[in-house]
Amino acid sequence: KQEVTQIPAALSVPEGENLVLNCSFTDSAIYNLQWFRQDPGKGLTSLLLIQSSQREQTSGRLNASLDKSSGRSTLYIAASQPGDSATYLCAVRVNSGYALNFGKGTSLLVTP
Amino acid sequence: DGGITQSPKYLFRKEGQNVTLSCEQNLNHDAMYWYRQDPGQGLRLIYYSQIVNDFQKGDIAEGYSVSREKKESFPLTVTSAQKNPTAFYLCASSIEQGSTGELFFGEGSRLTVL
């Protein structure tokens, strides 16, 4: 079974810093990888999706990379803001038609 | 607006009662999913459905039941057989054919057993 691990579990940074969130998975044969954001008591918001044939995706201040051979993905957040404070979840899909396997998330706090 | 609607947002249940959580989507998505979220546990898959009238068990299906009679609806019933039903339940959907398979989520339903 695909296992997804996110490190660190929690992170606190001052406003303006660039930061990297890490995600690792045990089986490199993936279909896609998706990064989500979750605010307290809310549902998940999709941030970026990387197909297995892609190396990275960018949206605004966010950049996600994928290295299938090493079983790793990173989410880079540039110039962090207090509004970025949330839990960030990484999820991997093994194949089309299958559900996502989630990591436990990284709780991010950006202090003013 | 297109999206996924879950109801109710909050639900309280007495032990021994069955409850049904609603999930409706107007995105014309093929597949729908139910996940359970507990503190420190991450999201765990309960059931998923790729097409109407068909669904598969996820990792923690015991004590739950679903139906998929319409493409836009995927209700989840939490039965009295579920030993620890207090949790945050999340419904999701995705296009499967000719698409990236990106998942979109509803706002969740919080179930508390009294």
Image (cartoon, coloured by chain):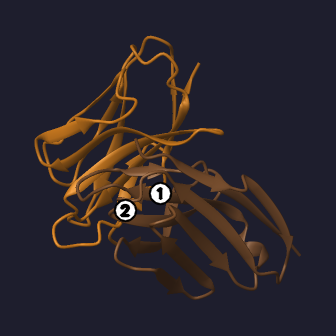
Chain colours: A brown, B orange
- The image quarter containing residue B92 is bottom left
Give the distance between the C-alpha atoms of the residues marked 2 and 1, in whole angstroms.
Answer: 10 Å
Task: Decide if residue B57 is on the left or right side of residue B110.
Answer: left
* Residue B102 x/y as whole percent: 35, 67
Q: Could you tell me residue B46's position as x and y percent?
A: 37, 36
Question: For the point 47% across and 57% down, which residue is it?
Answer: A91
| Residue beneath the point at 35% across and 59% down | A29
Q: Residue at x 50, y 61 (%)?
A: A71
Residue A10 lies left or right of residue A54; in this view the side is: right
Left-right relation of B113 to B64: right
The kind of residue tagged 1 is Ala
Marks 1 and 2: in contact by CB < 8 Å?
yes
Q: Secondary structure at mark 2?
A: loop
Closer to the camera in the image, B72 or A7: A7
Residue at the farthest top position: B16
Q: Which mark is residue B103?
A: 2
Q: Secondary structure at mark 1?
A: strand
- Disc 1 designates what residue? A91
Residue placed farthest to the bottom in the image?
Answer: A60
